[in-house]
Amino acid sequence: MAAHTVYKEPAPLTDRENPLESMMSRFNVAADILGLDEETYNVLKAADKQVIVHIPVTMDNGKVRVFEGYRVIHNTILGPSKGGIRYDKNVYLDEVKALAAWMTWKCAVVDIPYGGAKGGIICDPTTMSAGEIERMTRGYTLALKDVFGPDRDIPAPDMGTGPREMAWLMDEFSKTVGMTSPAVVTGKPLVLGGSLGRTEATGRGVMVSCLAAMAKLGMEIEDTSVAIQGFGNVGSWTAKLMFDKGLKIKAVSDISGAYWNADGINIDEAIAYKNAHGGRLEGFAGAVSMDAEELLTAPVDVLVPAAIENVITEHNAGQIQAKLIVEGANGPTSASADPIIYEKGISVVPDILANSGGVTVSYFEWVQNKQGFKWTEQMVTERADRIMTDAFEKVYQTSLKYNISLRIAAYVVAIDKVAQTYKFRGGF
Ligand code: NAD
């Protein structure tokens, strides 16, 4: 690649739905139910701000490669914007815009004082050295120093990023403002002001909201089997916490393939195997290989998509056997699959509710940084569990009130909160 070209691999051409359109089609249904006024509708459908940056990075071979990065601020009426940063070769602007809007709805559903944002860089971190990723992260932070800020916009990890990248971001931002600023980013290592309980927080929220939904459906823990797509942060923690509760995890998968055990997979062994084998399950002896697509339609009671977007579509929704889907990933179900799933009577705990445990504990991390006081793990989990169960109950009651799916109910709860805030603040 010539030194002056911008590293920008095109998103793969697939028949998959555009996540922004998926998000908007649910937003439109909820807006109709609420009778949302046209002015607020128009404000909420567009992102407040979209920034595109080009980050020159000296690669280990001495050549300079320019990476394209994004930060989209969807809305800040409820507070500073919050949202992760994704490093992936398939990052594209519409995806970042959808993810930013989902953050607005997610924070509103769990009633925390944040708006929504998301960022990403088109890159393949699996082929880059730690030094290259560090220089790229610092370059991205510098390019966005006027966007980020503890009371403006607070990034966090997403796919391809973790505590290491957040530490570099915090350090670079701190240098630009001339003081240590831990509250500018969450998902930091513990020693830099990270929160106890953050790493497992998203998986824990998925487990808590799954149990809440199972209770409404009259499903007993000991009779319930689960399939989980994705075995990264969200998938493996969901699996571990469900396994510890006594649910039978019959299938798990990651990028290397899917693995099945009708008697239940020992998740402690699966995690130990993954950690010892470069983060992958390939070759795990505690289960047999199964077709990766078949995991989604396997004979289980609960399906947890916890990897990527648009995996449940109109092509496979009709074959799903689970009674309950709990969305660990953001946007795993395309909008075209919604009516098929609804008709089949499958309950779906939607992404903006099910995976909001992560942003909830990110919020706790930010509060602790601002307080300069560290909470115990028990304080974190008790408060997060309460927020998750309260949010689930509110969404559930809304679904009963309007006779709608939990997904549309979650959008109704979120949009209503944001719309009411606009009404009180006024000032268009
Ligand atoms: P991660 O990078 O830690 O893990 C992703 C996992 O998915 C890996 O096991 C990977 O091998 C697997 N995977 C990728 N493509 C796959 C495919 N086609 N089939 C099966 N498995 C595949 O990412 P994560 O942080 O666990 O995030 C997963 C999802 O959850 C994303 O949609 C993310 O936006 C969402 N999410 C994450 C958090 C969080 O706190 N990490 C919070 C909310 C939502």
Image (tube, rainbow, N blue to C red):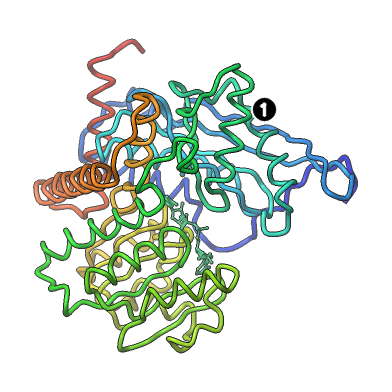
Is residue 393 positioned above or below 53 on the image? below
**In this view, 16 is above or below 187:** below
The answer to whether residue 145 is left or right of residue 285 is: right
Inspect this view and state whether residue 47 appears. no
- Given residues 307 and 384, the one toward you in this image is 384
Along the horizontal axis of the image, is 115 left or right of 56? left
Residue 113's spot in the image, x, y percent?
31, 28
Q: Which residue is drawn at 27% across and 78% down?
A: 248
Left or right, 341 with respect to 149, comes to left
Place residue 336 in its image quadrant: bottom left
Residue 199 visible from this viewpoint:
yes
Q: What residue sits right under mark 1 in the picture?
A: 143
Q: Residue at x 67, y 34 (%)?
A: 138
> Residue 402: where, in percent of width, then height?
12, 47
For disc 1, does the CB lie below 8 Å from ligand 1?
Answer: no
Disc tally is 1
Q: How crowded is mark 1: few (under 14 residues within 10 Å), some or many (20 or more)?
A: some
SS for callout 1: helix
Quadrant the C terminus occupies: top left
Query: Residue 136, relative to residue 343: is it above or below?
Result: above
Residue 61 percent coordinates (x, y)? 88, 50
What amino acid is at disc 1?
Ala
Q: In this view, does 83 lie above or below 341?
A: above
Where residue 69 sits: x, y (%)? 65, 38
Residue found 27% across the figure and 43% down from its top: 380
